[in-house]
Amino acid sequence: MAILNILEYPDPRLRTKAQPVDVVDDELRRLAADMLETMYAAPGIGLAATQVDVHRRMLVADISEEQDTPHIFINPEILERRGTEVMEEGCLSVPGYYESVTRSEWIRVRALNLEGAPFEMELDGLLAVVVQHEMDHLEGKLFVDYLSDLKRQRIRKRIEKGRRQREPATAGAL
Ligand code: ZN
């Protein structure tokens, strides 16, 4: 397994719309394992393939404290949604920022598992929010897109400033 590099906002590659998975093969299973390892190491509770610059429709999630309940969704689709819920969200691609986002409270999702078999799952609470957040990534959408232009610009500027300040150290390491 390997820890993958996570793209950070405003990297334009995060805007790529992911392609459906045709075949669930060993390569995809390896990617799922690497994505889980990357998510756990971050640490995070969800990760979409888009965030590791692989533009295929797969996401992983685990909201357990023990990091022992992984969920993998390949070609996820929301069949049904109910209610609304406002939750404070963060994102491994927008490190350090947390903002309130409104999403469906309950969803019924259909996806493929790692054997390529379809399954359906009803989700609510945090896991429902995580899956909706990660499915946005597969569409090239980020949680900051739900914020006002002003707020998003402010986040973008602060992240870019932080990156510039980190750059000399990186250059020195060459
Ligand atoms: Zn995210």
Image (cartoon, rainbow, N blue to C red):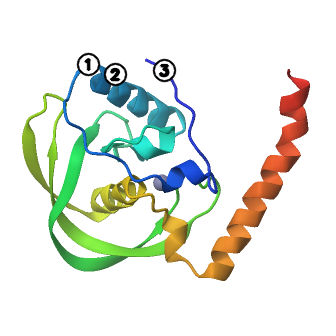
Q: Tag 3: Cα neighbours inside 10 Å, few (<14), some, or many (≥20)? A: few
Q: Quadrant of residue 103?
A: bottom left
Q: Residue at x 32, y 46 (%)?
A: 19
Quick check: can you spot residue 44? Answer: no
Q: According to the image, label 1 marks what residue?
A: 26
Q: Is residue 95 above or below residue 157?
A: above
**Residue 161 position in % (x across, y down):** 82, 56
Q: Quadrant of residue 86?
A: bottom left
Identify whether 85 is placed above or below 12. below
Q: Residues within 10 Å of mark 1 (few under 14, many from 20)?
A: few
Q: Which amino acid lies under the numbered mark 2 shown in the image of this protein?
A: Arg
Compared with residue 161, is residue 35 higher up or lower down, i.e. above or below? above
Q: Secondary structure at mark 3?
A: loop
Q: Residue at x 20, y 69 (%)?
A: 106
The amino acid at mark 1 is Asp
Which residue carries the number 2 mark? 30
Q: Secondary structure at mark 2?
A: helix
Q: Is residue 70 left or right of residue 153?
A: left
From the viewer's perspective, tell me whether residue 167 is left or right of residue 66.
right
Task: Give the x, y percent position of residue 85.
Answer: 33, 76
Give the residue pinned by disc 3. Answer: 2
Where is residue 107? Give x, y as percent: 19, 65
Indicate the quadrant containing the N terminus: top left, top right, bottom left or bottom right: top left
Q: Quadrant of the C terminus?
A: top right
Callout 3 amino acid? Ala
Q: Residue at x 52, y 29 (%)?
A: 4
Label 2 vs label 1: CA separation? 6 Å
